[in-house]
């Protein structure tokens, strides 16, 4: 399988793109057995790269997580996936350094605006783009402008490598989507855009990194979501739907 370049991208801060990049990458790598790397080009903060540093420090200084890491490597043979830092305009060149790593997926974590240098060019080289949306008017309108811009200027004009551009609901309040979501989805459909069937619920667990007290892991670059926290998160379902699309 040729390496697939994937971005969870939007121009609205706080939409969850970085968190979902880590969660999906970790699930694919540590649970599903795919070879994954991340190019962190969310310059200058490099949130994912900083998360890896915190994860490593926690494992080195905490007996519980040190044992957890040892057990994981012994059981699966899988070490932490590669994370490269880059500016958006250099992201593709950084990704080329990974061409001999036998990767299945490279995820790109990009800044939240297409006006940043190199973002539009990098997005044009993605195979698939997934944009999280929320049932908030400001978030929705901002994301729709972003996605319509990508769709009209890159996808429909065939001026890119993009094979698929998809929206999905994130931070959904309640166990089931309401009538409001159906109204929004009708508008999105009229724009010629596609919404994934799987939605991600609003939950405090999505903001949980490695705790200091030996509790179950949720968001981490070194571990997958703990099974006890996976249920109800819809991460497995979202990953399965993404894999089905990518083929």
Image (spheres, rainbow, N blue to C red):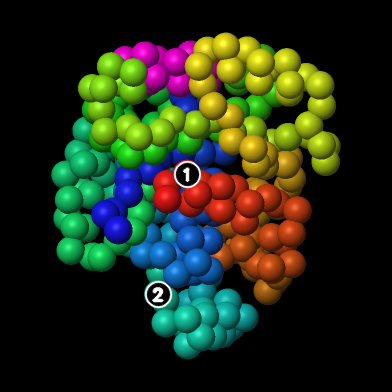
In the picture of the structure, the residue carrying the numbered disc 2 is 79
Rendered image quadrant of residue 79:
bottom left
Dot 1 crowding, Cα within 10 Å, few <14, some 14–19, many 20+: few
- Image side of residue 11 versus residue 175, left or right: left
- The answer to if 148 sits in the magenta stretch is yes
Magenta region includes residue 183 = no
**SS at mark 1 in the image:** helix
Q: In the rendered image, which residue does mark 1 sit on? A: 245
Query: Is residue 149 something one can see in this rendering?
Result: yes
Residue at 45% from the left image edge and 69% from the top image edge = 33
Position of residue 242 measured from the top left corner of the image (x, y, whole percent):
51, 46
Residue at 68% x, 50% y is 234
Comparing labels 1 and 2, the label whose residue is closer to the camera: 1
Q: Is residue 201 left or right of residue 93?
A: right
Q: Quadrant of the N terminus?
A: bottom left
Q: Which stretch is magenta?
A: 141-153
* Mark 2 element type: loop
Q: Residue at x 59, y 35 (%)?
A: 196
């Amino acid at each position: 399988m040729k390496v697939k370049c994937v971005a969870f991208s939007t121009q609205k801060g706080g939409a969850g793109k970085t968190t979902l990049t880590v969660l999906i990458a970790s699930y694919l790598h540590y649970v599903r057995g795919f070879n994954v790397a991340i190019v962190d080009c969310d310059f200058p903060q490099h949130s994912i790269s900083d998360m890896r540093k915190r994860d490593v420090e926690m494992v080195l200084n905490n007996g519980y997580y040190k044992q957890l890491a040892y057990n994981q490597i012994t059981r699966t043979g899988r070490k932490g996936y590669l994370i490269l830092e880059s500016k958006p305009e250099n992201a593709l060149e950084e990704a080329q350094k990974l061409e001999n790593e036998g990767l299945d997926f490279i995820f790109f974590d990009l800044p939240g605006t297409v006006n940043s240098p190199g973002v539009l060019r990098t997005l044009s080289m993605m195979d698939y783009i997934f944009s999280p949306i929320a049932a908030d008017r400001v978030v929705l309108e901002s994301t729709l402008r972003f996605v319509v811009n990508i769709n009209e200027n890159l996808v429909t004009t065939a001026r890119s490598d993009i094979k698929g551009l998809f929206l999905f609901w994130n931070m959904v309040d309640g166990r089931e989507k309401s009538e409001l979501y159906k109204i929004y989805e009708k508008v999105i459909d009229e724009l010629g855009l596609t919404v994934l069937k799987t939605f991600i619920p609003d939950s405090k667990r999505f903001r949980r990194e490695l705790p200091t007290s030996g509790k179950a892991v949720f968001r981490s670059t070194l571990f997958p979501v703990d099974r006890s926290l996976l249920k109800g998160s819809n991460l497995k379902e979202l990953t399965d739907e993404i894999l089905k699309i990518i083929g």
